[in-house]
Image: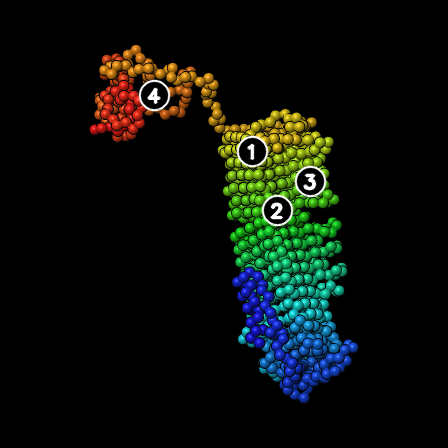
Amino acid sequence: MNNSRNFAQSQAELLLAKGTIISISVASILTSDISSAQITPDTTLGNQSSRVTTGVNIKEAGADLIEGGVQRGSSLFHSFTEFNVNNGQRVYFASPTGIADIFSRVTGSNASHILGTLGVNGTANLFLLNPNGIIFGTNAQLDIQGSLFATTANSFQFPGGNEFSATNPQAPPLLTMSVSVGVQYGLQQPASIINQGNLVTGEDLTLSAGSLDLRGRLEAGDDVFLNSQQGTIDINGSIISTSPSRISGDITIDSTGGSVYLNRSNLNTNNSGSGDAGDIRINASDQIFILNGSKISSQGNFGRIFIGAGNHKNTPKRVNINGRSEINTNNSGSGLAGDIIINASDQISILDGSTLSSNGNMGRIFIGISDSNKITPERVNIDNSRLSVDNVSAGGNTGNINIYSVEEVVIKDSYILSGKGSINISRNDNNSTANGGTVNIKSQGLVSLDKSSILADIFSSDQDGNGGDINISAGSLVLKNESKLDTSTSGTGNAGDVTITASDSILLENSQISSSLRNAATGKGGNITITTDFLTADKGTIEAQSPGKGDGGNINITTLNLWLRRQSKISTTAGAEGLGGNGGSIRINAKGGFIVAVPSEDNDIVANAFGGDGGNINIRANRTLGFENRGKLKPEQLKRIENNGSSDISASSDVGEDGEVAIETLSIDPSQGLVELPIELVDPSRLIAQSCGSANNRVAKEQSEFVITGRGGLPPSPDDILKPGIRLPEWVVNNTINSSNNSENITIKEVDLKQLSSNTSNSLVEAVGMVHNANGDVVLTTQPVVATPIHSSGLSSKVCGLIQGNVRE
């Protein structure tokens, strides 16, 4: 029995190590030699011991019938040292008149192997207790009209402290009526229950053990309850359901001391009729894994699904849903769809193509918290998955999607849809007060969508009402890889509004923010309001358009800087040929900053109209760079403006009134004051003097002269005056002029014209040498210097004294 005791625990360790459930054969357990095993009553009941009669015809087939036992009111008690059912064997407990519950215990040291049929010949409930383990083989089945309660606990507990124990066997308690029953486990690790068979009961089905390994089918007419005390619950390739032929019961899976693994399995409380569907509750003290295409569904009226949220005191650390698993509640009739509630204390991850959906009236999805008493997880990851609540019945109201996290919500490659309901994504916020049709995202840090969509749309043209709103408040917002925020509508109402506030920045990379009308919708595009320090759109679209009869919405952007790259677009264009529709208004306030686009990258700010009037565009910034402000455009030009290869601003109409474009710039245009260079070039060689005078004459008499006087440099052209703002150096008086290398020599930028004239007898003295002083200034000298040329210019140093080199001391 060591194998059966440790089976679920070893399988859990393999799952944690490799990230998947590995099938481990239990053939050694199920095929162990029980040829000599039998049903053997013990002597603890005295002269009322259990009796086994073989060859009895039960339900037109041979069977073994268990009779005798001790009766206490409506309860009957049996006790065995061995209890096994072989392959092909049929074993039934007799159910005398007036008996409601049959309690059986195994006081020996071996597990019970149920490889054939175990039944009750009547309507009583069967309770089976064996602390050493219970194993249902691949051919095991039940024939029980009432309930089955199988457990590896030490004893059954009754009110008043009475018990029916297998480890301390005594006479049955004195009971006069059927009462509620509990179980009592010992201090040692309880044994396991393993099922590979087909276990079906007419009423409840309960399996309670140290750990559970479930690979077969479990079906109950009422409730299914699965409990592990210290180990795991491993549901691998199993089907667990409540019967759809009547009002469905609940499925409760609770690992009190371990984890729950659901792998390639199906849990459902479906009801195909008009009755209520049952609830599904999965809880664990450690972790919950729903893996590899597992399906959890509650189809019918008000059937709810709780994952990690069924017990306030036993919240799991992590919930992981992946491998294209599905969790859904659905009601295709007039009733209410149930909620999906998922909670964990540390982390929730919904990964790899998994789906959460609630289709029907008022279905809701809660991720992270269901009420103020729950613990909000640190982190929620939604990766390559789909979350949706949608209305599938006429006139119904769809519920909400609520996602809560203490630290971070990361959405990647995912699709989140609320047809008429609301989506609330909050950091450290336990309140859900949003009106229907809204998306609320709150975070002090980063909100990131990667190849993901958050929609508050109305898709059906038959629906009335407005699209939902999207409200985002974050430190930074990043939308990339075809992500989308959308409040559009195909119905008769208006599109919803989008309001985004990001204290730091917004990046829209190959993604879209849209609040538009679809198809032939006749309402108005929604308003988009964005406030941030820095807004960058790279292949990004911000649009509040209407392609039909409706008007475009308004776009209001307040930012320090706006940068548009690679066919980015801000558009409130409306109407179509023959349909009409007025363009919406665009207001961009970048006071103190810049609005920049690359001219050749086809970025557009447009409020055009077809059949109606163009909208207005009002831009305020220090500078607007890279755009061409288009005037009145012909219809053909209007059609091509968004793909004409240039960055444009336009508020035109093909047949109606053009809109007004007002661009207010608050600083000086940097292009003002620039002097246009002449096109015809002059040969500079014709302007250079051909000689510098004799070697002994330092005065360039009757030669070309170039004299700079005054301070502040030269004007751009001889016709201009000096521009203000140019630095004016102070005058420097030079009392001595010599060839020494010191700070009192005349520099090229500081010259005392009077001093220079007094030392040259009213003549300009030609500089024949040039050195650098200790301050690094260039100094012209009247004496030649001895220099080592760096480059040979072809001229003697004595000719002009303009040789660069190192001064010899």
State which tag comes first along the sequence, 1 or 2: 2
State which tag comes first along the sequence, 2 or 3: 2
Is residue 743 visible in this depiction of the protein? no
| Type of amino acid under label 4 | Arg
170 over 717 or under it: above or below: below
Task: Read off the residue under disc 3.
Answer: 518
Mark 3 residue element: loop
Q: Which mark is residue 711?
A: 4
| Type of amino acid under label 2 | Ser
| Type of amino acid under label 3 | Arg
Look at discs 1 and 3 and give the one toward the viewer: 1
Look at discs 4 and 2 and give the one toward the viewer: 2
Q: Which mark is residue 690?
A: none
Marks 4/3: CA–CA distance: 68 Å
Mark 4 residue element: loop
Task: Read off the residue under disc 2.
Answer: 453
Marks 4/2: CA–CA distance: 65 Å
Q: Are marks 4 and 3 in contact (CB under 8 Å)?
A: no
Whole-percent x, y for residue 794 in the image: 30, 22
Crowd tier of the residue under label 2, counting other residues whose Cα lies within 10 Å: few below 14, some 14–19, many 20 or above: many
95 over 235 or under it: above or below: below
Q: Toward which corner of the image does residue 64 lie, by quadrant?
A: bottom right
Crowd tier of the residue under label 4, counting other residues whose Cα lies within 10 Å: few below 14, some 14–19, many 20 or above: some
483 over 239 or under it: above or below: above
Q: Are marks 1 and 2 in contact (CB under 8 Å)?
A: no
Mark 2 residue element: strand
Whole-percent x, y for residue 36 in the image: 64, 82
Q: Is residue 39 left or right of residue 349?
A: right
Query: What residue is drawn where x is 51% and y is 39%?
Result: 533
Crowd tier of the residue under label 3, counting other residues whose Cα lies within 10 Å: few below 14, some 14–19, many 20 or above: many
Task: Read off the residue under disc 1.
Answer: 601
